[in-house]
Image (cartoon, rainbow, N blue to C red):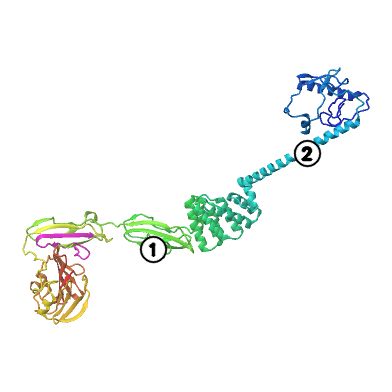
Amino acid sequence: MLCPKCGYYAETDEIVCPECGEVLQRDSGEPVRGAQAIRQGKRARQARDNKSREQPETKTRRRRGGASHATLEMPAVPDTRGADTDDRDRTEEGSDPPEDPPEPDGSGYERRNRSVYDESGIRAEQAESFAASYAKRKQQHVSEVNWMKISFVAVIAAALLMAGTWLFLEKTDSGQRIMARMGLEANSTALWAVGEEQLNRGDVQAAINSFEKAKEMDEASEHPDVDGLLLLGNAYEAAGRVQDAAELYEEIYLGTPFRTEAYVNHIRILQASGDEDDLARAAELMKLAYEKTGDYTFKTQRDDLLPAPPKVDLTAAYYESKKRIEIWSYQGFDVYYTFSAEGELPECGVKYTERVLLDEGEHNLRAVAVNGKLVSDELRATYKIVMPSPRMPRATLAPGAYKSRQKVRLKPGLDNMDEDGIVIYYTIDGSPPGSDSPIFDGDPILLPTGDHVVLKAIAVNKYKKSSNPLEVKYKISVAPYPLTAYTPQDSFSDLTLYETTMMEFQSIYGEGNLDETLMLEGFATECRKYVYPWGYAIMNKPHTEWVLTELYVESSGVFKAPRGTDVGDTASYVVSRFRDMGQVASPSGNRGLYQNDSGRGIILAQANKESIIRYRAVTAEGNYWQLDYLTNSAGNVKAVDWLYCP
């Protein structure tokens, strides 16, 4: 018959469905007809075929049960039980109750061994009792096994769930972001991401809190999250904390100078303030940004903000004449300039008001245009003014030895023959020519006599540039020859400068009156001045004793002056007693007498036609003695001053 629950075909004598355990309901014994009979037959054949395939091997087992039992052959079923396990144990463990072995029937399919009862005579109460007992044992067994499994699986599942949750939250980016959203400990990457979400939602303060936590965590990192820091700066600005944003942007571009965003944001903040100092700072920042990033936009922006550099009307170059330059700003701003390489403009500069003279030399011009606190880039220009020098003058008398007095003329160099403003200075006393030397006026120059006559000359042009010196040596062997020059042996009486002691001097000329103590040039210690009726004497104490350093005489006959000279002599007489090369006076009135390695003689013109005839002689120690004859307007000596010059 068919099982009403699962549709399995069961034998007519079976009480319980062998497939699902459902209690089979017996019919009244009426034969099954129609479609039901067809289905039962089909199911029976399928069951038989399946059993034949699954259990091909059979063994014969005989069962004795009286005259009503038949002997059947049934398939051998492998025994998976232990040797010591009885049927009762298997039943308690949940296996199906034992069944009688099948036996073949006359229709060709297997039947299970059973007691021979009348098919309609099976007692209903016995079948119902057996089915209820079986179902109860099975339900008991199933319930116990399910609770154990459920408990074990639940514990494992909970542990796995907890471990998975921990791994997800701690080890994944999504988990870290969840923790950050919940306000729990998370890494900086998650905090930056959550802060950006909060900023996009408009929750500025929450975004700042997240960003600041992330920034604090990244402070020790060598590679900060620049994009995150820029978002923090944006959040500061959104919250009205502009100064904090500016400081953060500065921190960013100082640490990461090649990124442009922080420069742009800081420049925008400075320009938005409108303050002149902030605008000046913005210009400096634009310059720094261009230098660090190479972005030409910053340079263009700076050029638009600052005044344009000033202009100058003279091209920087080499010139051979003095120049005057004009500096101006075409935008009408003030201009400050300097020729110094040091100092900041405009503070160290001069405000331009009129044309600037460029004299001879090298001039490095620096100038800026100024509009309030905004200062332009510097104008720089270098001018080199080198005015041309004249050629060396020429002498008409060739160098050599002559046995008669000679005269000589001087001419400009060949390249300066047609040049105006050439002046020739010359000397024949042995001194180098200069602006205080005689000027050649075209008249022939009478050369002195002697073995060492030297004509020296230079040419000076209108730019005050001097030529190289001309030097021509002659030997004029004609008497009278010049006298010798003044030497340290030419002294007053038996006195010696810086050697005669004060005691020796005062023993002859008296103690005098101590007038004053004074410091004289070249002396390391103070000096004492003693006054006498004839003049004064000055003493100095270089070591342990006071010595004579200066003697000033205004009266004649007191001392025996050098070479027989004395107060009251004429200037011409004094000059005739020493060497004189016959050089004429210069335009200033000074006249050189001689100059050589041992000393010099010169007449210095003074006011009111007075003069000083001065001789100097070099000592062996490298110092010199000086002998001055002071003359009055009449040309007579009014005093003689003899002194030691260290």
Residue assigned mark 2: 143
Membership of 434 in magenta stretch: yes
Residue assigned mark 1: 355
Q: Secondary structure at mark 2?
A: helix
Q: Nearer the viewer, residue 334 or 135?
A: 135
Residue 38 visible (yes or no):
yes
The alpha-carbon separation of the residues under discs 2 and 1 comes to 116 Å
Span colored in magenta: 432-459
- Amino acid type at circle 1 is Arg
The x and y percentages for residue 616 are: 15, 68
Left or right: residue 18 compared with residue 580: right
Of labels 2 and 1, earlier in sequence is 2
- Amino acid type at circle 2 is Ser
Q: Secondary structure at mark 1?
A: loop
Name the mark nearer the viewer: 2 or 1.
2
Mark seen at residue 271: none
